[in-house]
Image (cartoon, rainbow, N blue to C red):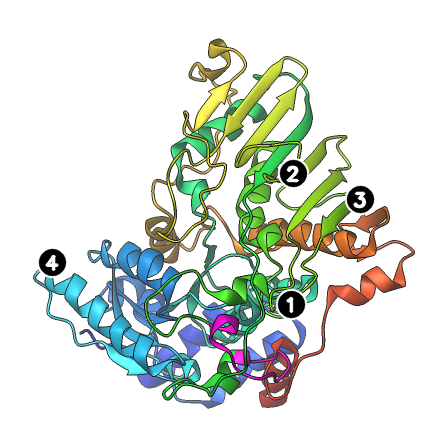
Amino acid sequence: MHTHTANTSHSSRRQFLRTTLLAGATGAMASYLRAADSAPAIVPAKVLGKNAPSKVIQIAQIGCGRIGRESEIPGIVKQSHLARIVAACDVDAQRLSLGKQLIEQLYAKQSLSMSVKAYADYREILRDPSIDAVAISVPDHWHGQMAIEAALAGKDIYLQKPAAITIREGRQMADAVKQAGRILQLGSQQRSSENFRIGCELVRNGRIGRLKEVRIGLPTDPLGGVVPDMPVPAGLDYDAWLGATPMVPYTEKRVHPQKGFGRPGWMCLEAYCAGMITNWGAHHVDIAHWGMGAELTGPGEVIAQATYPKSGLWDVASTFHVEMKYPNGVTMIIDTMSDTNGIPNGVKFIGEEGWIFVSRGSAKATASDPTSGQPAGKPLAASNAKILEPLSGSNVIRLHASKNQHLDWLESIQTRQDPVASAEVGHRSCSACLVAQIAMKRGSKLTWDAKAERFVGDDAANAMLTRPQRAPYGTDAALKKATAKA
């Protein structure tokens, strides 16, 4: 394991860090960053550049459950020439132990001897100056707070999608990352699949003529039954797992399996996740925005219908139909595949001169992903074979080409250039999904002001842009603490 020291003097290192982090920061955030000037300055390797004793990025993995084990851990370990996972964290002691073991075993297969530090509290990782970056693979309700605190601590971030649990938390997160000058990559890995990028490039370059409509098909999760309250398992910090959400009795299906790493029940509970509208929707809406050229904006009008479970623990929408009209005239239609419309799992761009359909085909991100309705055909298809012919010419619009989501993040840490799925882009795709979720609940047509990030003339809808946060957790508490320190 590498430790970071510098040949420069203590004072010059402090000044370098101060100058780097304060660039572009304003207001309370700038005040917070200036507070570092009075603290001991130990500069991460990435800041020192060519003067660093090691250019290998030191990473901590926060969350050692299903997605961490199947995505972030193996994905980052494969890039050992650029980075090493040197620490792991989880509020479940059993998962933490297994996560540490998995990381060390994967490095051993590369003939790398690693001793991974284990933490129960992610805040200890954020206080460790030898850690350059964090990979956050935790339930959705923790995304915003952890990303904000990591940015304020000077860490670069890989954040599983969706960007946040509410639109307000997403805005707080994107602003904190920007003002702290951090690199954040959302786990929107479809952007690193060639078929999705090529499909979006073809649409952006007019291969199907003027874009009129985008249709998105999403899978569904099974409904859950009635479950009893249970004792909290030994080794699980349940209060920390709940975070800013209300204190409620423990039951295994509310959290995650105690044996194995199957699909967790929290993904079907609104306190922790909006359901499939953000779970898969964040992926497909992100691709729709990419193809539409609407990555930094959002819909204008939205109307939605949804059905909800009438009993049992799980309470997110089980089926839904959403129609969103964007200011550029494009209509986005989102359906669960169990709906009578039968839209397959993927994104279909429909233009005046044809259509393009992109999907994952038979690929799955994790072993427990739902497969109902997953198309078995080609992951890139069109109404006419000529539409898919390679683009050529000097005026062709080319999108960010990434072959691997984790590698793209690490390279962005080195170059300090935006990755393929930045904080602002991720926030905007998540926001569109959450606007759709709010429309499901309101059951009436809503008008969304994407610039102000508020609904026009609907106080009840605007009240859903945020939610109460249980002390001492939450994004508000994190930012208030940062301001107080400043």
Residue 252 located within the stretch drawn in magenta? yes
Q: Earlier in the sequence, mark 1 or mark 4?
A: 4
* The N terminus, quarter of image: bottom left
- Residue wearing tag 3: 303
Q: Which residues are magenta?
A: 242-255
- Residue wearing tag 4: 110
Q: Say which amino acid is labelled 3.
A: Ile
Q: CA distance from mark 1 to mark 4?
A: 39 Å
Q: Going 52% across and 82% down the picture, which residue do you hit? A: 250
Q: Going 60% across and 69% down the picture, which residue do you hit? A: 313
Q: Is residue 448 left or right of residue 107?
A: right
Mark number for residue 169? 1
Residue 337 located within the stretch drawn in magenta? no
Q: Is residue 261 left or right of residue 457?
A: left
Q: CA distance from mark 4 to mark 2?
A: 47 Å
Q: CA distance from mark 3 to mark 4?
A: 52 Å
Q: Going 78% across and 37% down the picture, which residue do you hit? A: 327
Residue 216 pos. (x, y %): 60, 36
Q: Nearer the viewer, mark 2 or mark 1?
A: 2
Q: Nearer the viewer, mark 4 or mark 2?
A: 2
- Residue wearing tag 2: 339
Relative height, residue 138 to residue 324 (above, below): below
